[in-house]
Image (tube, rainbow, N blue to C red):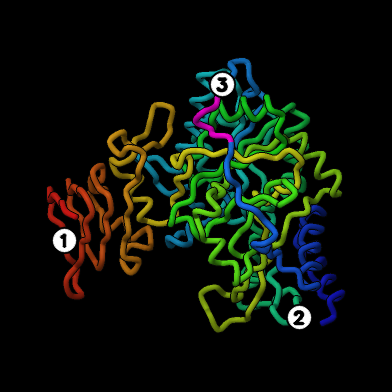
Amino acid sequence: MNSTSAFDAARQKLETDGAGSAAIESFVRFHHQLAEGERGLIAEDAIKPVESLPDAEKLPPADASGPLGQTVMIKLNGGLGTGMGMTKAKSLIEAKDGLTFLDIIANQVTKVRERTGAQLPLILMNSFATRADTLAALASHSSVRVDGLELDFLQNRVPKLTSGDLYPVEWPADPELEWAPPGHGDLYAALVTSGMLADLLSADYRYAFVSNADNLGAVLDERILSWFASEEIPFLMEVADRTAADRKGGHLAQRPEGGLLLREIAQTHEADLESFQDIERHRFFNTNSLWIDLVALDAALATGEGVLDLPVIVNHKTVDPTNAASTEVIQLESAMGAAIALFEGAQAIRVPRSRFAPVKSTGDLLAVRSDAYLLTPEAHVVLAPERNGIPPVVELDPAHYKLLADFEDHFPAGPPSLIGCEHLKVKGDVLFGHGVTVTGAMTVEAEGVGKAAVSDGTALTGK
């Protein structure tokens, strides 16, 4: 392989696409690491478990004269709902009481402004695919705009590389498939290349709360903000206790000499996978909600000439993800939480599970739409008190419920009552009627190959 030519080809492709210098340098750095055999792996014997952390539920009340007026809320909104058969931003799915994720987020910001008088800008990191639909939807929330600041900035895109020679892949049948998202670690380069970081600093915004748009549990907590600012922490990661469901998610660890880091499963040696998934050993997982001191971030970027030295994550795919026989490619990504290892004094804080409630499937969506969750006057989506902090588990047959349109067709009268449900599993093609209630742990299965129906008013109770 002529690696120099491969680097040049990648740089040229990015320059032709209009990428900013920070995005180009970040990708080329990853490309060099890949060519030199670097895979971003973190060995188990090179880290130690994290034993204890500050607890968000034990923080003192927020300081009434605190830093809210210097704070901005950034939501990662680059994802399409492709996993649910959508071709628009996932945040535009109806989430609760006729409101989309984006509606609820905008309402949260409005409520904080009304209560405190702080401006609290809402800024989205969009992708090329989500920008137009999202900004059109935000037109009905015109009050969220803050003078002098854009409502969004664009995440970058990077070339997929052929597995053999590491050149940018060519796919004339659909040139858009030649590109990949660079992971949410692109947040930092995108803040620079878009000019958003400079705009925020010039407008005297100091702190950013960053979270995923599909995580309705990630609301701005003023107690965490006050503590974060008063302790002068440059970078803070929210983590929660790992359960069996989180075994494959990125976990927090520390280096023997001190300092925290984030390890993803793609950064783990095969021999270390058992340790990676040991939730008793590695107790905390990254919720992907961060608090960032923008002044500290700007200083770190200046030191790195506009780039943070994040570890590379190497993913092996096919250029057409729907065609396993298409060209094998490598996608280079990074995780924004990995920046915890780059800031002296960075910390993590243990938060309740309620702050991590992402909607990744139609089963998650059914639970959120049901009476197991409530929409509060502050526009927070929370578990009903009867749930005692434990969400229902909903598993829907992907053959019939994976796509949003099919899912909607199977619940024409809305979701069943799940306030007393522990676990609902649906197998086969089942249509749910009006006023269905589910209590305890239930499996509903359609017999044969046809459509079955749960009649109006049916009470499904059992273990």
270 up-or-down from 113: above or below:
below
Q: CA distance from mark 1 to mark 3?
A: 51 Å
Q: Earlier in the sequence, mark 1 or mark 3?
A: 3
Q: Which mark is residue 165?
A: 2
| Mark nearer the viewer, 1 or 3 | 3
- Helix, strand, or loop for circle 2? loop
Number of marks: 3
Name the spot of residue 77 as percent of width and height, x first. Answer: 56, 48
Identify the main secondary structure in magenta: loop
154 up-or-down from 201: above or below:
below
Residue at figure coordinates x 79%, y 67% from the top left: 33
Asked if disc 1 and disc 2 are in contact, CB closer than 8 Å, the reply is no
Q: Earlier in the sequence, mark 2 or mark 3?
A: 3
Q: Which mark is residue 62?
A: 3
Residue at figure coordinates x 72%, y 29% from the top left: 232
Reply yes or no: does residue 131 show up in magenta: no
- Helix, strand, or loop for circle 1? strand
Give the crowd class for mark 1: few <14, some 14-19, many >=20 residues within 10 Å. Answer: few
Name the spot of residue 79 as percent of width and height, x first. Answer: 55, 55
Residue at figure coordinates x 17%, y 49% from the top left: 436
- Over which residues does the magenta segment extend? 54-62
Which residue is under mark 1?
A: 453
Q: Is residue 333 shown left or right of residue 2?
A: left
Q: Earlier in the sequence, mark 1 or mark 2?
A: 2
* Among the 4 quarters of the image, the one containing residue 370: top left
